[in-house]
Image (spheres, helix red, strand yellow):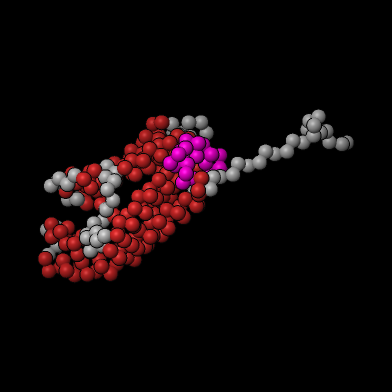
Amino acid sequence: MTEQPSSLYGTQPESPRPQPPGLVDQIAGVFTAPVELFQRLNKAPSWGWALGAIIVVSLVVAVIWGLKVDVDEMLRPILERNPQVQSAQIDTIIEMQKKFIMPFGILGALFGTPAVLAVLGLFYWLVGKALPQDESPSYLQAFSAAVVPGLVKLPLMLLIAAICLMRPIGGLTPDRIAPTSLGYFLRPESLRLQAALFNVELFRLAEAVLAFLALRYLVRMKTAGALICVLLPLLLSLGFGLMRAQ
């Protein structure tokens, strides 16, 4: 017996798989059309080029900042406020930190950044499976949602690198160099309040908004889940900053 054709017009050709947006499209998309970008990434998740760009720029900032920062000016006030550190130990600690600040910065950019994003993607994936808008997301979709919104911070990182090259930065940490946060303009005496104001930063807020949109349109998560995924890391970051300011 001969097989019957699947239709009067024969077998229909498969529709081509959607192609993921490239790096240039992703960078342009986060600034101009984030919803459309995340809808495209939902059908064709992509994170490799974005992660590579973030790692490269983070590495550039780590090297330039590590070469310019005054480690003594950065650490001595902190160590002097710590009652558990004896004054005789301060110089030794500072000299040790001078040797390791560059290697630690490079390792953080190369391995710490992708590790943190991988954990964040896992968090998005688990919440997305618990609170899906329709079908459960894949890990690739969740990882793309963790990585791609970070492209919005590339101009900030390049600005930090440029400022480090153009003028002395003393003991400033990277988050306190660029004039993009309230802490840059307002300097209250309370260290905790200073830390809170430095957390109110333009590009960090933009990244949070983009993360919410990515969770809604890329991961296809319910609004409640997207809010949890955005607000919890922000609160943890604020809490960690306040602890460091003690």
Q: Residue furthest right?
A: 1
Q: Residue at x 54, y 45 (%)?
A: 21
Q: Residue at x 26, y 45 (%)?
A: 181
Q: Residue at x 29, y 55 (%)?
A: 174
Q: Is residue 23 left or right of residue 199?
A: right
Q: Is residue 32 magenta?
A: yes
Q: Residue furthest top?
A: 8
Q: Is residue 142 visible?
A: no
* Quadrant that contains the N terminus: top right
| Of residues 227 and 20, the one drawn nearer to the viewer in this rendering | 20
- In the picture, residue 20 is in which quadrant? top right
Q: Is residue 236 magenta?
A: no
| Of residues 217 and 118, the one drawn nearer to the viewer in this rendering | 217
The image position of residue 25, as x and y in percent, is 51, 45
The image position of residue 35, as x and y in percent, is 47, 35
Q: Which residues are magenta?
A: 26-45
The image position of residue 144, as x and y in percent, is 48, 45
Q: Is residue 25 left or right of residue 13?
A: left
Q: Is residue 209 left or right of residue 192?
A: right
The image position of residue 198, as x and y in percent, is 24, 46
Q: Is residue 189 visible?
A: yes
